[in-house]
Each structure stands twice: as C-alpha cells, then as structure tokens.
C-alpha cells in the first residue's frame, strides 16, 4: 500500500474548487483504484492523504488530464504553496 501526502497553504478556495475536488475524488476511486481518501483543513493549512495499491496507479492518476488541470489551477489560484510525498506502508 502507498500513501500520497498532499500538503498545502490555502490562498483562496472557490466553488469551482469544491466541484472539481468532488469529481476528481470520485474519479480516483472509480478509474485509478484509490482505496481511501482523507482531507483535513485547519486555519489556512490543508493536508490530504490518499491510499493506493501501486505506484503505477499513482502515476496514472498524476497524469490524468482533468487532474493535470486541477494541479495547474491549484498553483495559479487555490494554493500559495503545496507539496506531495509518497510513502510505502509497512503493513
């Protein structure tokens, strides 16, 4: 099992963000085998954890055209900083 850790400092979230996030979450489960997703926000900090069976699924998800658009909008509009880490579970 692999865990993708997304951390961000929120600049400004808008209705487009909420709609896109919900659609992309459903797509990750349906098309890319995401197993679980958790997201937490406190003040202007966001952390999201997603759980995957393989690095290939993560790579395919990263390169999904709709997800690429969301990444671009994230850098341009929604977040002032963000980072992604991938860890492998020992279980």
Image: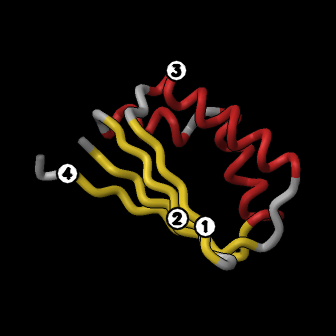
In the rendered image, the vertical position of residue 79 relative to residue 67, given as above or below: below
Alpha-carbon distance for marks 3 and 4? 22 Å
Using the numbered discs, state the Cα–Cα distance from disc 1 to disc 3 in whole angstroms.
25 Å
* Residue located beneath label 1 in the image: 41
**Which residue lies under the disc numbered 2?**
47
Q: Nearer the viewer, mark 1 or mark 4?
A: 1
What residue sits 34% from the left and 50% below the top?
A: 3
Find residue 85 and report its image quarter.
bottom left
- Apparent side of residue 4 relative to residue 79 in the rendered image (left or right): left
Q: Residue at x 41, y 39 (%)?
A: 36
Res 45 quadrant in image: bottom right
Q: Is residue 48 visible?
A: yes
Residues under numbered marks 1 and 3 in contact, where contact means CB atoms less than 8 Å apart? no
Question: Mark 1 and mark 2: span between their CA atoms?
Answer: 6 Å
* Mark 2–mark 4 distance (CA, rounded to whole Å): 18 Å
Task: Find disc 3 in the rendering and name its residue.
Answer: 30
Q: Earlier in the sequence, mark 2 or mark 4?
A: 2
């Amino acid at each position: 099992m692999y865990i993708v850790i997304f951390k961000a400092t929120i600049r400004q979230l808008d209705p487009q963000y909420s709609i896109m996030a919900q659609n992309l979450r459903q797509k990750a489960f349906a098309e890319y085998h995401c197993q679980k997703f958790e997201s937490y926000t406190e003040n202007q900090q966001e952390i999201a954890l997603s759980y995957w069976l393989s690095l290939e699924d993560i790579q395919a998800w990263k390169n999904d055209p709709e997800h690429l658009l969301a990444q671009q909008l994230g850098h341009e509009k929604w977040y002032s900083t963000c980072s992604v880490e991938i860890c492998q579970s020992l279980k």
